[in-house]
Amino acid sequence: MSLPHAILTALLEKPSSGLELTRRFDKSIGFFWSATHQQIYRELGKLEAEGHIRALPAEQPSRGQKKSYEVLPAGRAELARWTAAPQDPKPYRDAMLLRLRAAAVVGTAGVEADLRRHLALHQRQLTEYQEIEQRDFPPRPPGSAAAPQDRLQHLVLRAGIDLETFWTQWLTHALTEFAQLPAERPTE
């Protein structure tokens, strides 16, 4: 996934200013595709130069007024092209897993504490995702169907919930394994 496509998606959902976009990224898209505020503003400029978005006319001209953007037909076509194109999964990289592998040969000093810290972070993220699910996707009455857009957005959220559930379970298991390791002798 690329940042331009994330921005096009967000703008198709709701035309927004750069500041509004950065706030929305912090609360939704940023959970699975992060970007700094500078990256978002830089990309807005590129998308506008490419004719994929345009700044909406301001109601009153004013110096320093925030611009709101909307997606143009060329931007919608680019997003549709990208969405339909096949893409292979990216190889997974995780520093914690590499650190555990390294700990097997150099010792585990500091690793258990960081596993506990990671567990707390994943538990917090899981709780946040579950709260979003309860707020935005409450159970539906029998026989009623959610709109396709809502179903797909819920599917993305469920991926986050399932990943955080995996990590909390795996980290709990890892800490159980750590508790069973023999005490380390100081290295010479």
Image: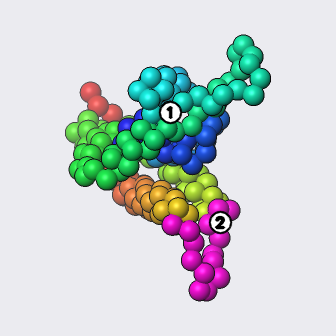
Coordinates of residue 120 in the picture (x, y in percent): 55, 49
Q: Amino acid at mark 2?
A: Gln
Q: Which label is found at residue 53?
A: 1
Q: Secondary structure at mark 2?
A: helix
Residue 16 falls in image quadrant: top right
Q: Is residue 185 magenta?
A: no
Q: Is residue 137 magenta?
A: yes
How dense is the environment of label 2, judged by Cα within 10 Å: few (below 14), some, or many (20 and up)?
few
Q: Earlier in the sequence, mark 2 or mark 1?
A: 1
Which residue does the image show at 49% across and 23% down from the upper left?
45
Which residue does the image show at 33% across and 46% down from the upper left?
82
- Rounded to the nearest whole Å, what is the CA distance between mark 2 and mark 1? 34 Å
Q: Secondary structure at mark 1?
A: strand
Which residue sits furthest right? 60
Q: Amino acid at mark 1?
A: Ile
Q: How is the image coloured?
A: rainbow
- The residue that disc 2 covers is 134
Asked whether 134 or 127 is in front, the reply is 134
Which SS does the magenta portion mostly show?
Answer: loop
Q: Quadrant of the C terminus?
A: top left
Q: Which residues are magenta?
A: 134-148
